[in-house]
Amino acid sequence: MSRLGDLLELLHGARQRWQTAQVVVRRWHELERGHRAMERGAERARARGSGVSMLRVGPRSSEEDAEARQVSESISRLWLDPGRDRVRIERSDPHGDFYSVRVGERWWSYHPIQGAISNEDDPSVHLGSTDDVGALLDPALLLGRLDFEPIGERMGAEREGIVVRATLRELEDPHRQGHYLPEGADDFELLVDVERGILLRLEARLDAGPFMILELTEAHFDETFPDDVFVFRAPPGEQVRSHRDIYAPPEGVSVEEAVRRAPFTVLAPRRLPEGWQLNVLYAPGRDRPPAPPSVVIQLKDPTGLHQLRILEQAEALDDSLDWVEVDLEGERIFVWEPKMRLDGEIEAKLERHGTHARLTGNLDRTTLLEIARSLHAAPPEIPLVDQ
């Protein structure tokens, strides 16, 4: 068999060469280069005729914060026992130490911001997967998407490895490319374990530089784990709460009920185009993870093709979008429009009567601004439809 054939056989059979795994994984990401890769991936998808939406990152509170967030890094330790359907994850990153245990359908987790949470009363609620390491320990998941070229040898995690350059195959349907690799990379460098065929390292590259590295720094296989490894213990003083109770969906209410419950002035549109429907949702807020009380007003036209979501709360709605200020009859309203309609929905934000409102929808700019202009403090009864 050829050298490439040997490599493909090694990758294809990797998952059958281990029964249990205890690994330490380092994930490194350069945010600016990674964002450029996402944009390039979106451009390639559009060139094939695919509609895509760009994910927008969260707020930057200062220049120092923006500088610090140019590189993101985390370290995870995982105990994987697929034969008995058990997983333990411990992860450390700038946001705090995360810890979770899953046994079958039931799971428990802890994070300093969220506290201790479980799905014991509702097994239909699933915990986040281990996709980050899925492709490392089962690289057959990548075989249909990449072309491979062995280029050398190197050690990784104190194990012998084959260095491989991999490039994306051009697929007619980009949705078939899967989700185990970041979009927009020029190429990838893999380090394949000579003995087991797993990936010791995966590096995504753009413009001759890395923007994502996923690598094993420790790897131990086929150990017998004591049952105690998969017993969750909350930190002292922490009560394990129900995921269903903490993340209960907002409650559907009338405008009048939202006005009664909300600790801020509820804004509602005085006039809407004929035939539009209006629904109101209220969320009381929570201390942990922190979320302020909020009201969401959902609007849609009779066809259901055009929709608008108005999020309202007392606190400012921060983000990192490049807003454009618009003077609307003497009032400042900020508008953000995607470069192309396929990139996302148009947005607007304003403050009125001490309430911060953000409007997001697939409307045209004129209709969005007309609805924004009509937002007023909601009395018990308001006319909501054009006559």
Image (cartoon, helix red, strand yellow):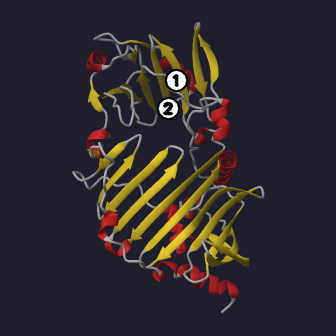
Question: Taking 250 as reference, is 213 above or below it?
Answer: below
Instruction: From the top left corner, tell me how far across and down residue 101 is, in percent.
Output: 35, 59
Amino acid carrying label 1: it is Leu
Tally of numbered discs:
2
Contact (Cβ within 8 Å) of mark 1 with mark 2: yes
Q: Which mark is residue 361?
A: 2
The residue lying furthest to the right in this view is 208
Residue drawn at x 56%, y 44% is 53
Q: Can residue 192 be seen in the rendering of this structure? A: yes
Question: In the figure, residue 208 lies in which quadrant?
Answer: bottom right
> Which residue is tagged 1?
368
Amino acid carrying label 2: it is Gly
Image quarter hosting the N terminus: bottom right
- Give the CA separation, mark 1 to mark 2: 8 Å
Question: In the figure, residue 193 lies in which quadrant?
Answer: bottom right
Residue drawn at x 39%, y 62% is 88
